[in-house]
Image (spheres, rainbow, N blue to C red):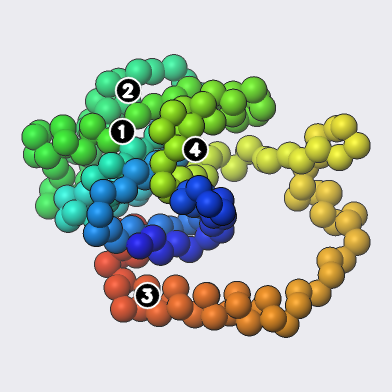
Amino acid sequence: MVATEGVCQGATGTGQTRCAGARVSVVHNRAMSFDLVLFGGTGDLTWRKLMPALFQAFRHGKLPAGGRILAVARDARSDDAYRQFIKERFVEVDRAKQPADGEFARFAALLHYRRMDLSQPGDYAGLKAWLDERRADTVVMFLATAPHLHYGLKKNGSYVNPIVEHRNMPPGEPVAPSLMNVFSSERDRYLQLLVNNPTPLRAANN
């Protein structure tokens, strides 16, 4: 079971779920292929907060055995160099949460690295190819990017900033009451899951 706070989209008939969200709690009872992509994989948020939280989830058996964690950033480095980068930064984590060498080696086997310039659309093709190599059951993308980055959309053949562009757009159609009922029901269900099992939230915020 995967509980998320964010946006997920399932591809009908493929068994795949793709999510873009802030926090994801994974509870597994079977082998599951799982890819987590961290945009901004060398930034402070990733190594100060996300990696320690992910390691604690790994330590306590909360991550799927078939998982991969892909860090994406602009500088060039190998998988092994990235693993060493993360290992060196664990010295700044509370001692009780620091991994032993053998423990980190097992966690590091999940870590991968890919160089990308997020402003270049062509770089996303390489990321898609990497993900498509095995077509994981679940793909989660986490944006831990610098504030100067913005995400564009194409309008009449030109890229525009959606943050600015939405101000010039007509108001949207109201959401049908039947859809709002479904959304509210699902929202309440996930909130109840978090209330009953707050451990993932605590790990993510410590």
The residue that appears at 91% across and 37% down in the rendered structure is 156
* Cα–Cα span, label 1 and label 2: 7 Å
> Which disc is residue 39 wearing?
4
**Which residue matches tag 2?**
79
**Which residue matches tag 3?**
193
Note whether 103 is above or below 24 in the view shown: above
Q: For the residue labelled by badge 3, is the local secondary structure a helix, a strand or a loop? A: helix
Q: Earlier in the sequence, mark 1 or mark 2?
A: 2
In front of the other: 95 or 4 = 4
* Cα–Cα span, label 4 and label 1: 13 Å
Note whether 9 is above or below 171 in the view shown: above
Left or right: residue 188 versus residue 121 is left
In contact (CB < 8 Å): disc 1 and disc 2: yes
Inspect the image, locate mark 1, and give the three-letter code of the amino acid beneath it.
Leu
Q: For the residue labelled by badge 1, is the local secondary structure a helix, a strand or a loop? A: strand
In contact (CB < 8 Å): disc 1 and disc 3: no
Q: Residue furthest front?
A: 13
In contact (CB < 8 Å): disc 2 and disc 4: no
Inspect the image, locate mark 2, and give the three-letter code of the amino acid beneath it.
Asp
**Which residue matches tag 1?**
111
**Quarter of the image with the C terminus in it:** bottom left
